[in-house]
Amino acid sequence: MITTIVIAIGALLAGVSGGYVLLQQLLKSRIAKMIQEAEAEGEVIKKDKILQAKEKFLSLKTEHEKQANARNAKILAMENRIKEQQNTLRIKSEDLARKEKELEQLNDSITAQIDMIDKKRVDLEKLHKQAVEQLETISGLSGEEAKERLVESMKDEAKHDAASMINEIIDEAKMTANKEAKKIVIQTIQRVATETAIENSVTIFHIDSDEVKGRIIGREGRNIRALEAATGVEFIVDDTPEAIVLSGFDPVRREIARLALHQLVSDGRIHPARIEEVVNKVRKQVEEEIIETGKRTTIDMGIHGLHPELIRLIGKMKYRSSYGQNLLQHSRETANLCAIMASELGLNPKKAKRAGLLHDIGKVADEEPELPHAIYGMKLAEKYKEKPEICNAIGAHHDEVEMTTLLAPIVQVCDAISGARPGARREIVEAYIKRLKDLENLALSYPGVTKTYAIQAGRELRVIVGADKVDDKESETLSADIAQRIQNELTYPGQVKITVIRETRAVSYAK
């Protein structure tokens, strides 16, 4: 049994040994095959790398040849340019040499001519001396005396010619300047059409029946006294049928009084406590409306970046009038005129429109300043950080400060256009008659003036002088002096034409 087991184990060991040998042979053959495959793959990679290196080399060689060709082409072009420049320099040097030779010949010719001229000048001086001696002998005057007489004669003639030329130049300049100015002004006016609201210092409040008047007056006049105390406006209740007159110079207060009275009459409850409540409420509404009007105006005009206080003052212009012309409408019209005129003259129309809209803000200040409205408006604009050219245009539109920019005369002119056009403003008859008399009396104060007539609503002043007291030159001086005095001493819209009538008429304008 043991022997059998030993034999089996030996057979098993012999089998395992044979398998191990067989496994070794298989591994060796596998390794040899893998080595062969690796060597074959290495050869393929080697060939690919060699091909890539050759392609890279050819590419670099081609690029190098291109660069070399480009450099050679540049060098060749530079050589050609240098050759052309050399040829040009050679031609110029030849021309220069030729011109130098011609110049030498010309110098020789000029020298010869100068010598000849010197000789002729000597001969001419001799002849002149002989002629002067003969003239002195004939006229009995020395050379100095004759020279002085000739100089005086030439001076008089030159003065006369100069005066005539100056008058012609001035007339031509006036015609040209007036023509161009009129063209710009007419074009500007034609492009602006603005309605003008005429307001008074009273407001008429209409009522349905006269019975309401008693309720408004109240017992022993308590209601009407409360209304006047709360609004600062005088309520005139008279025999006028179905109407109550609100009188006051402050249009904002009159508007507050009108709206408050309308609410009280509509509500029917009229007593002092209710009156104060309604007036306070309406005052807040009017303030809001003023601000809203200012904002709407700036938006309509395309003006941005204004201080809120300036916007409020613009809205307040709606309730202010000047010579019957609504101030807000006047300012809007002036702003549009300024923008158009600035565009015609090649200036900034936005700045001009801004200055035109703000030029009268001094008239609607909350306090009553002692300064003129133009100066006060300029200080307000400076306070609220407006640009210096805008402030100067506001302050200078009545010549109360010096104009420093071109915006200032534009605002001044457009303000006069808006205020002086027909129908824009309403004058009191007494003031109108007084202005005409002042014009006539001013001209009558001059010696030699016999009659004066203010015609065309004070736009022209005709002055008749005595022909034996005033000559033609003095009439010209007289018209200019009267124009200057009117400009300095009187206040008037637009311009006044002064015509002095003698045998001739000399016309000047006070602008």
Image: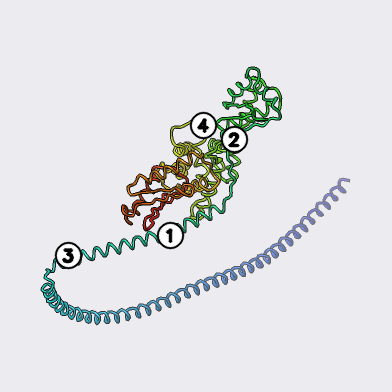
Q: Which mark is residue 175?
A: 1
Mark 2 or 1, closer to the camera: 1
The answer to whether the residue labelled 2 contacts the one labelled 1, judged by CB atoms less than 8 Å apart, is: no
Q: Earlier in the sequence, mark 3 or mark 2?
A: 3
> Pointer 3: what residue?
148
* Viewer-nearest residue: 201 or 31: 201
The answer to whether the residue labelled 4 contacts the one labelled 3, judged by CB atoms less than 8 Å apart, is: no
The answer to whether the residue labelled 3 contacts the one labelled 2, judged by CB atoms less than 8 Å apart, is: no
What amino acid is at disc 3?
Glu
* Viewer-nearest residue: 172 or 457: 457
What amino acid is at disc 2?
Ile
> Pointer 4: what residue?
366
What amino acid is at disc 4?
Asp
Separation (CA) of disc 3 from disc 2 = 79 Å
At horizontal 21% and vertical 63% (from top left) the residue drawn is: 152
* Viewer-nearest residue: 333 or 472: 472
Separation (CA) of disc 4 from disc 3 = 74 Å
Q: Which mark is residue 290?
A: 2
* Viewer-nearest residue: 402 or 101: 402
At horizontal 37% and vertical 55% (from top left) the residue drawn is: 502
Residue 219 sits above or below residue 318 on the image: above
Q: Is 148 left or right of 283, judged from the image as shown?
A: left
Where is residue 305 drawn, in percent x and y?
A: 54, 42
